[in-house]
Every structure is written in structure tokens, then in C-alpha cells.
Amino acid sequence: MRRALWPDEPGVDGMEELRAALAPADAACVLLALVGDEAVGVAEARLRTDYVNGTTTSPVGFLEAWYVEPDWRGRGVGRTLVQGIGDWTRSRGCAELASDALLDNLVSQAAHRCCGFEETERVVYFRKRVA
């Protein structure tokens, strides 16, 4: 599912990348949605203590990854994962859960809104090669 979410990222489903996503263990959470033995969705979150765009508190929970298999979308799987991440975030003493979506990913933006997220700002990143 990580490869489906980030198809252009090499090694995104490798063990090193997975270990990094879970470290440190007390500041990271991964939830897997199962139907029988089939994984149909995943959500990854971590606590962020640095500034998170659009938030007013620190630390905040940040939804780092959120994916539901296409055949299972629109059935409440994503909402249940976000609720679980929200519960974990609250259990860590946070008042806010933040996330992001690409500007052109309108499906993700709509899914966030359906789960109670509110848009706070839009950002355009720039890069300039200096070497």
C-alpha cells in the first residue's frame, strides 16, 4: 500500500523506510485495516514538535500516510482509520491532528474534509539549483 501511495519513491516499502516511519516507537503509530486476512487500508501518523502549517499547538499528531484500496473506498475504512489516528493523537496529549494533500489531489482533499479536517492554507514550494 505504501508503494501505491507513493509510486515514484524508490524503496518506500523497504524495511529501512518502514523502520524510519515507526521511530521512535512512542511518537509513531501505524494502523492497518483488515477484512478477514486482507489488508484494505493503512494510516501512519507521528507526533511533530516542529511548526506544522495551520496548527496552533505543539506537539500535534500528523497523518503522514493514509491509503485505502480502491475497491474499499467510500465504505468508511478511511474514516475509521482517521478516527483511530485521532484517538492515538489525543492519547498522546495533543489537541490537533494535521495532514496534507497535494494541490491537484482533489480526491484526497475531499476525503480529508469528509473526515472533519478543515483546510488551513495552501503552499507552493520552490527550488533553485545552486550547484
Image: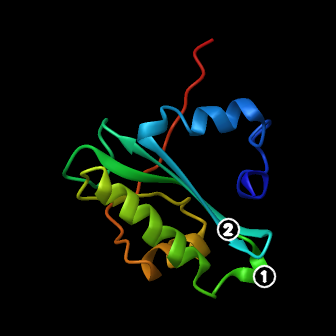
State whether residue 127 is above or below residue 81: above
State whether residue 37 is above or below residue 24: below
State whether residue 131 is above or below residue 88: above
- At 51% from the left and 77% from the top, the residue drawn is 79
Q: For marks 1 and 2, give the CA distance.
A: 10 Å
Extreme residue toward the bottom, this view: 75
Nearer the observer: mark 1 or 2; the answer is 2
Q: Secondary structure at mark 2?
A: strand
Q: Which mark is residue 115?
A: none
Tell me: 128 left or right of 40. left
Horizontal and vertical percent position of residue 75: 63, 88
Horizontal and vertical percent position of residue 121: 34, 60
Task: Check the picture and name the quadrant holding the C terminus.
Answer: top right
User: Can residue 50 be seen here?
Assistant: yes
> Who comes first in sequence, dot 1 or dot 2?
2
Horizontal and vertical percent position of residue 46: 45, 45
Question: Along the line of sight, which residue is nearer the eye, 84 or 109?
Answer: 84
Colour logic: rainbow
Q: Which mark is residue 71?
A: 1
Task: Check the picture and name the quadrant holding the N terminus.
Answer: bottom right
Horizontal and vertical percent position of residue 95: 23, 58
Disc 2 residue crowd, few under 14, some 14–19, many 20+, Cα 10 Å: many
Tell me: 50 left or right of 8. left
Q: Which mark is residue 41?
A: 2
User: Can residue 65 be seen here?
Assistant: no
